Amino acid sequence: MNKNLYDLVGLVVAVCFILALKGLSSPKSARRGNWIGAFGAFAATEVVFYSPGQTGNHKWLIIGAIAFGVIVGVPAARKIQMTQMPQLVALFNGVGGGAAALVAIVEYLKLGTDASMADVVASVFTVIVGCVSFSGSVVTFLKLQEIMTTRPVVFPGGRFVIAATLVGVLGSGEWVIHSLGTTPLLVVAGLSLLFGILFVLPVGGADVPIVISLLNAFTGLTVAASGYVLQATVLIVAGTLVGASGTILTRLMAAAMGRSLFGTLFGAFTAKPQAAVEGGEARSVKSGSPDDVAILLNYAQRVVIVPGFGLAVAQAQHTVREIADLLAAKGIDVAYGIHPVAGRMPGHMNVLLAEANVPYEQLVEMEEINPTFPQTDVVLVVGANDVVNPAAKTTPGCPIYGMPILDVSSAGNVIFLKRSMRPGFAGIENELLYEPKTTLLFGDAKESLTKVVSALKAL
């Protein structure tokens, strides 16, 4: 392929990625944005076969890599549950960072003594940040999957160990830049992998989505740097877009969680221990039946539904939509209160409810819905816990302290759907469950809501 034509295709691909990102900024245009991005990715992959300097051996290696990716990626994407989407995002992000690091390692080993300083620095940067993104993303996956503890992992002198590791990474990076060789490169890669692990361990479960976004930005930077090394404009543009959007999303999420980025990453080292809960007696709660819940909903004038991770686990979004439709038919005002990280990932609840064709106009963000709770008769909390837990405001030292929450406690009545009294993802008790205005409906969310639907129809 002519180089000018090759570069033109790269420009078209870059424009596709920009338009895709723009489309993904709104649920209404997200599907179109996905298709545009997919087309761009397909074109970027296809044009590689016609890039200048390609040989038959290279093409067969590319085909083999694509086949392997299809065999692994397609079944994983099709079978993944919505509840496991954050983990999948973490893994994909880690794979991207690791792939960029491997490319940089190969390119670094091909550099000769006449290599420019810019190429060497870009290669070393990509290895460092790519390895950090890979190992850090693996730890976020383990936390989200609850294979390891979701609580912050801290140890005596942890801050100093992390700082020393970072100094080691930067020092070995300097060594690699001025002493081309395999041994220095392996040292910097190993230290970077270790730093990625130490970087994420102190982060508590509720803050993991912020770290995933930050690591996603890291991966974008590595892709852009590897694009510079490979002289690939598409990689530079795509990596820069991911890096910029990931950085913006990280800042927005940190603000939504009431955290500074530094506090998110290292707050566990300075957090004060929580006071022990006084008394050892079991506390009573008010539980109800589906008929009780149906009566409360039937005689309300305004109802707010708060979806959470439990809704995704039970796949109850269609049943929730049916309840909302029944209430709307009775002239009851219905809205959905959406917390920025409900379901452990930004937009998770929006996507889940979109599957059930919930009108986008009924989805109300936290800042807009909170002032309306005092005028709300009933709040139906389906599988959410931490995002409505008053401890975020009242209990200094708890994992979610300072996080903005949905102020459902100011509503007239609260109905909580829970499987058990087990704490939420942050591992702390929710005092709202013991309030006189709170009614608990125990059981699987989908089964419980199906019974509520039947009771509503009978009224």
Image: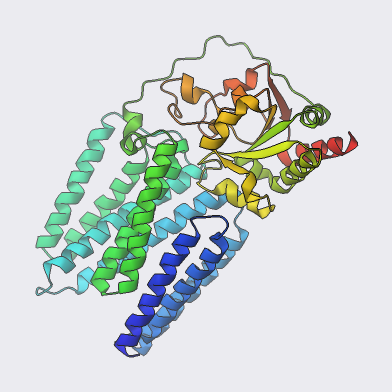
Quadrant (top left/top right/bottom left/bottom right) for the C terminus: top right
Compared to residue 243, the image places residue 43 above or below, namely below
**In front of the other: 4 or 91:** 4
Q: Quadrant of residue 273?
A: top left
Q: Quadrant of residue 244?
A: bottom left
Q: Quadrant of residue 450?
A: top right
Specify whether residue 447 is in view: no
- Report whether 429 appears left or right of 150: right
Q: Position of residue 357 (x, y in %)?
A: 69, 53
Compared to residue 53, the image places residue 377 above or below, namely above
Query: What residue is shown at x 40% (from left), y 56% (from top)?
Result: 94
Q: Position of residue 306 (x, y in %)?
A: 63, 36
Quadrant (top left/top right/bottom left/bottom right) for the N terminus: bottom left
- Report whether 134 appears left or right of 422: left
Specify whether residue 234 is in view: yes
Q: Position of residue 34 (x, y in %)?
A: 52, 65
**In front of the other: 298 or 127:** 298
- Report whether 319 appears left or right of 216: right
Query: What residue is shown at x 49% (from left), y 74% (from top)?
Result: 39
